[in-house]
Amino acid sequence: MKKIGILAAILLFTGFTSCEKDDICVDGDTALLIINFYDFEAEEETEKAVAKLRVVGEGKDTTVDTVVDRTDLKTISIPLRINETSTTYNLISNSADNEDGDETGNTDAVTFNYTTKEVYISRACGYVIHYNDLTSTLTADADNWIKNVEVVETKVENIAVTHVKIYH
């Protein structure tokens, strides 16, 4: 009987000490790229919503976030590819479909280039990706609605800051 009590005490002690306080993951998500939109014509920096914005990844048929699809937005949060060093998005202003279902909005392509680094957070969260050395390239066309893309934060590690400003 004494052995059972000792065994129970050991199991109870092991059970309580094997859990760590980080077994609940709070900060375990890879950060999204935060883009704010601004008025290109304003003398002072003024946020300006993009009318009926749609965001589609290059080579994809669906939008990044269907909840905000074709909505007037001043800011967006979009993911970057974790296994690549670049991600291209088609940003569509005044997005709509014609009677054949084809896109009729003004599409501009923006490519984001970066390096990636795996960062260990905790046993519960595992690893997240941090993006460093962020740069951007706007593909020029005959009718760009985007006038300028400015990277203001070259590290994408959290969602508390604006990483990119797009002027239109």
Image: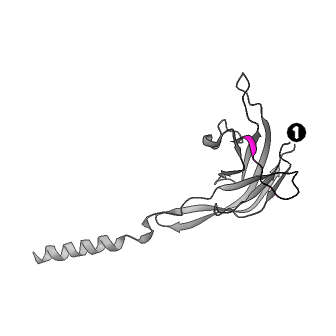
Residue 140 in picture, x, y percent from top left = 87, 44
For image coordinates 30% across by 73% down, the residue present is 14
Q: Of residues 144 and 3, which is closer to you in this image?
A: 144
Does the magenta portion include 51? Answer: yes
Residue 135 in picture, x, y percent from top left = 78, 58
The image quarter containing residue 101 is top right
Q: Is residue 18 above or below residue 147?
A: below
For image coordinates 69% across by 56% down, the residue present is 34
Q: Residue furthest left?
A: 1
The image quarter containing residue 144 is top right
Q: Which residues are magenta?
A: 43-53
Q: Is residue 4 above or below residue 163?
A: below
Q: How many marks?
A: 1
Give amino acid for label 1: Asp
Tag 1, which secondary structure? loop
Q: Residue 94, can we see it?
A: yes
Does the magenta portion include 78? Answer: no
Q: Is residue 31 left or right of residue 25?
A: right
Quickly name the residue at label 1.
Answer: 143
Q: Of residues 125 and 51, which is closer to you in this image?
A: 51
Residue 33 in picture, x, y percent from top left = 68, 55
Residue 58 in picture, x, y percent from top left = 72, 42
Query: Which quadrant would the N terminus be assigned to in this image?
Result: bottom left
The image quarter containing residue 127 is bottom right
Q: Residue 85, can we see it?
A: no
Q: Main secondary structure of the magenta part?
A: loop
Display colour scheme: one colour
Q: Residue furthest top?
A: 99
